[in-house]
Image (spheres, coloured by chain):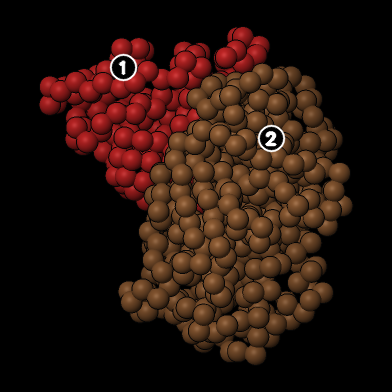
Chain colours: A red, B brown
Amino acid sequence: MKLTGKAWQFSDNISTDLICPGRYYHLRSDLNKLAKHVLEDARSEFAASVSKGDFIAAGVNFGLGSSREHAPIIIKMAGISAVLAKSCARIFYRNSFNIGLPVILCDTGKIGDGDKLNIDIEKGEVQNCSTGETLHFSPIPKIMAKFLEEGGLIPYLKKYGDIKI
Amino acid sequence: MKKTIVEKILSEHSSRDVHAGDFTVADVDLILVQDGTGPLAIDVFNQLETGKPANPGHSVFFIDHASPSPRRELANDHAKIREFAREHGAVMFDIGDGVCHQVMTEKFTSPGGILIGADSHTVTGGAVGAFAIGMGSTDIAVGLAYGKNWFRVPESYRIILSKGFRRGVFPKDLVLHLIGTLGADGANYKCLEFSGESLGHMSVPDRMTVANMSVEAGAKCGIFPSDETTKTFLENYGRGDKFKSIKADKGAEYEKIVEIDLSTLKPMVSLPHRVDNVLPVDAPELRKININQVFIGSCTNGRIEDLRTASSIIKGKKKHGNVRLIVTPASRTVFEQAIGEGILEIFNKFGASINTPGCGPCCGVHQGILADGENALATSNRNFKGRMGNPESFVYLSSPATAAASAITGRITDPRENM
């Protein structure tokens, strides 16, 4: 999978409350409306200005907190094609692959806001076209890479009928 | 090869020997779904087109987060959950029954079992020696449909507890201290396995508070061995037959060992907007923090033991004029006990607002959203920006004793001054 887009920089510890605030709890069954508020408490301009294919480049522990899968869903709906972070909270990480949103763990300290990136998931490379630097990342766990290939856990199960380790 | 508690449980449920780092498919014993994540789990379940849930009698649905419904949209979500549970014969707990994690531990979660829940605080079930983990709606839908899911066996940190708490210090203070020590991602993907001589005088409710917040250090689960204390707890809820002794093998491998002498701990406070941003309650910078709202409740600290401690501190005292106190018993059982013991009368006379059992204002949906610039002191588990419904407000976390003492003074107060 090869991806191209520009990076939106976020800080450390972006919680699911910042991604998908509890005050919009009532919009969870109306994802189009909910997606308009994605990350608004972290960067208020994000939802209106993000372009299809863009990346999030965050610090440590991205997505900490609640199990709400709505958080990665509305990030994906906003057009984000991959989340890059120094580290990612466990449930958010798993939820993202389940819905077909790749999370890439790499040194995002070398990515600035607005940098243009080329990502090759199989090769484990992030090319920062703005700085000329190439970042490397460890392969995605095999089973999660399989989900990603199929577009998420549900399409995977539809195809294979069972989870194969 | 010797095993940790998690390795034992996952091996038994996978019908093969598994160890930290392995990926495995395991049967799940129990599934928990709540009103914030349930509607999406139902949609995904329907997409899977497998028909009925694999184990409807062990699939438990809760309406606890926005309960009773404050809005039309949420009322419709609730109707969808009720309808699904009715159609498939799943177990349903409706408004007023309580927080999912409290009810699950009282009525369902058993030692050695696997519980997956569409709520991050599902880890609470580790208090009775279950492998209990939070997952998203898709994973829960897969669990509902297939009765199993895939897991990566986590490495374990062994947390060894020695001696006992001093007066005014509680399990909440222990877990806040631990999260402060490890950091908010210090145990990411790991299991926190608790052990040591102190377990002999930690009740299951005490253990629930600690297991509940293990996720705030990033942990996949927090787990206690099951012992005589667990057995008595289960017997008290009429589930003595579910007892099973479970503990780690001597010589099991741990990635890290953390030793904590409980007698050295002080009451702790977590400062906004990070749970691992902790200070002892007597830190000078906390003295000037005025509190507008105190919340006593949640899956972390809404149990009868918590309400007893808090009510004993406020009894006969006057609430500070600038403070609102919200009390939310964690379950219908707790509510009934609190009525029977005269505790709600004490809170009522003190001037508290008493909520129906449920999550209360913890997750910022209703029942106590803060105004701009306001400070809350809450016994719940998270103080992220916006957590209690307003990104312009500030949430501090503490034990019920510290919360109660602070409701009297209107500022963050050391409970040892009132005990």
| Front: mark 1 or 2 | 2
* Residue shown at the point (49%, 41%) measured from the top left: B157
* Residue shown at the point (48%, 20%) measured from the top left: A144
Q: Is residue B292 left or right of residue B199?
A: left
Q: Residue B371: which quarter of the image?
A: bottom left
Please, what secondary structure does the residue beneath circle 1 have?
loop
**Closer-to-camera residue (B307/B85):** B307
Q: Is residue B104 above or below residue B11?
A: below
Q: Is residue B147 above or below residue B375?
A: above
Look at mark 2 in the image and give the residue it sits on.
B114
Q: Is residue B63 visible?
A: no
User: Residue A17 at what x, y percent from top left?
Assistant: 45, 49
Q: Is residue A135 left or right of residue B12?
A: left
- The chain identifier of the residue carrying mark 2 reads B
**Closer-to-camera residue (B263/A63):** B263
Q: Is residue B269 left or right of residue B163?
A: left
User: Residue A122 at what x, y percent from top left?
Assistant: 35, 12
Look at mark 1 in the image and give the residue it sits on.
A124
User: Residue A54 at what x, y percent from top left?
Assistant: 30, 28
Q: CA distance from mark 1 to mark 2?
A: 34 Å
Q: Is residue B187 visible?
A: yes
Co-location on one chain, circles 1 and 2: no
Tell me the kind of residue under disc 2.
Answer: Ile
**Closer-to-camera residue (A119/B413):** B413
* Residue shown at the point (78%, 25%) measured from the top left: B54
* Residue shown at the point (19%, 35%) measured from the top left: A112
User: Residue B410 at what x, y percent from top left?
Assistant: 47, 82
Classify 10 Å Cα crowding around label 2: few (below 14), some (14-19), many (20 and above).
many
Classify 10 Å Cα crowding around label 1: few (below 14), some (14-19), many (20 and above).
some
Tell me the kind of residue under disc 1.
Answer: Gly
